[in-house]
Image (cartoon, grey):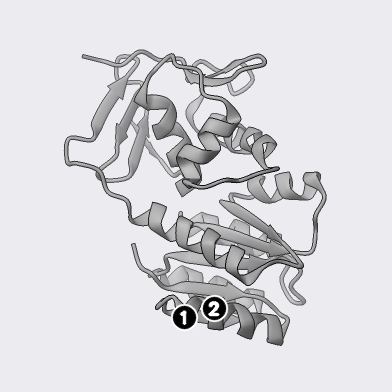
């Protein structure tokens, strides 16, 4: 995956600040204050991360996120002044992978950005092809692909990471906290409940009936587990 980062932020000074911090890390950084331009840049591909402000003047950031998700699974880091939990959850339901609330520490943003980039670059050994439920679910970790009932499904990096984590030990119950740390690789205090949104999005893509899940099961008071057995 590319190390190129696209910053979509209409505040000129803030956009420059974020860009300077990321460039210090040796990253290639593009920036724009226009949602429409950001969509065009995203369609060209070649990005490793998008830092997106939801409060854009021309095209709502939510619409930019939806358009990016139509053509790419590039990690998206939301940058917004909205701090309510419902706004964070709404952001994740758009397909975002992480969330930073203004005002924020530039160092924290860099930490989160590098974690998302690192996760996007992770490759496992070529033997990373595992099937579950008599072929109902096939995970190709080396190719970063997931097949459900013979159909290739498009997952965000976070969704793919959650599913892969659950599949490591089918039937084992993982708490929200464990999943956050397995997927992100660092502390994510205060955001455990947003894992519900990622699970909800995953179920829409992998379950026959999301309201009656068989692939990703909820264990009340404990967390989640993969409900399918590994094929041998």
The answer to whether any part of residue 172 appears in the image is yes
Secondary structure at badge 2 equals: helix
Instruction: Looking at the picture, tell me which residue is in the foreground, 55 or 116.
Output: 116
Residue at 61 percent across and 56 percent down: it is 66
In the rendered picture of this protein, how many numbered marks are placed on residues? 2
Q: Position of residue 144 (x, y in %)?
A: 32, 45
Instruction: Looking at the picture, tell me which residue is in the foreground, 114 or 28.
Output: 114
* Label 2: how many Cα within 10 Å (few below 14, some 14–19, many 20+): some
Quadrant occupied by the C terminus: top left
- In this image, 36 relative to 141: left or right? right
Query: Dividing the picture into quarters, in which one does residue 60 lie?
Result: bottom right
Residue at 57 percent across and 74 percent down: it is 7
Q: Is residue 49 above or below residue 196?
A: below
Residue at 33 percent across and 42 percent down: it is 145
As measured in the structure, the alpha-carbon distance from the residue carrying label 1 to the one carrying label 2 is: 5 Å
Q: Is residue 168 above or below residue 124?
A: above
Query: Dividing the picture into quarters, in which one does residue 153 lie?
Result: top left
Find disc 1 in the rendering and name its residue. Answer: 24
Secondary structure at badge 1 equals: helix
* Label 1: how many Cα within 10 Å (few below 14, some 14–19, many 20+): few
- In this image, 47 relative to 205: left or right? left
Whether the residues at callouts 1 and 2 have beta carbons within 8 Å, the answer is yes
Q: Position of residue 130 (x, y in %)?
A: 26, 27
- In this image, 191 relative to 182: left or right? right
Q: Position of residue 125 (x, y in %)?
A: 19, 41
Query: Dividing the picture into quarters, in which one does residue 17 lie?
Result: bottom right
Residue at 57 percent across and 45 percent down: it is 187
Find disc 2 in the rendering and name its residue. Answer: 21
The answer to whether any part of residue 74 appears in the image is no
Instruction: Looking at the picture, tell me which residue is in the foreground, 114 or 54.
Output: 114
Quadrant occupied by the N terminus: bottom left
Residue ranking furthest to the left: 126
């Amino acid at each position: 995956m590319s190390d190129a980062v696209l910053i979509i932020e209409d505040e000129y000074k803030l956009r420059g600040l974020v860009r300077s911090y990321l460039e210090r890390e040796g990253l290639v950084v593009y920036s724009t204050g226009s949602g429409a331009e950001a969509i065009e840049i995203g369609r060209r591909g070649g990005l490793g991360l998008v830092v997106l402000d939801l409060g854009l003047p021309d095209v709502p950031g939510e619409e930019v996120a939806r358009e990016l998700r139509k053509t790419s699974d590039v990690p998206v880091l939301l940058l917004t002044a909205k701090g309510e939990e419902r706004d964070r959850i709404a952001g994740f339901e758009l397909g975002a992978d992480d969330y930073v609330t203004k005002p924020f520490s530039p160092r924290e943003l860099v930490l989160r950005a590098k974690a998302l980039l690192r996760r996007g670059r992770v490759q496992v050994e070529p033997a990373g092809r595992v099937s579950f439920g008599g072929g109902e679910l096939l995970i190709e970790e080396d190719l970063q692909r997931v097949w459900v009932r013979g159909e290739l499904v498009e997952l965000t990096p976070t969704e793919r990471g959650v599913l892969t984590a659950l599949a490591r030990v089918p039937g084992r119950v993982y708490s929200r906290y464990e999943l956050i740390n397995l997927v992100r690789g660092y502390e994510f205090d205060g955001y455990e409940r947003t894992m519900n949104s990622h699970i909800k999005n995953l179920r829409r893509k992998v379950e026959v009936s999301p309201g009656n899940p068989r692939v990703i099961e909820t264990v009340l008071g404990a967390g989640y587990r993969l409900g399918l057995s590994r094929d041998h």
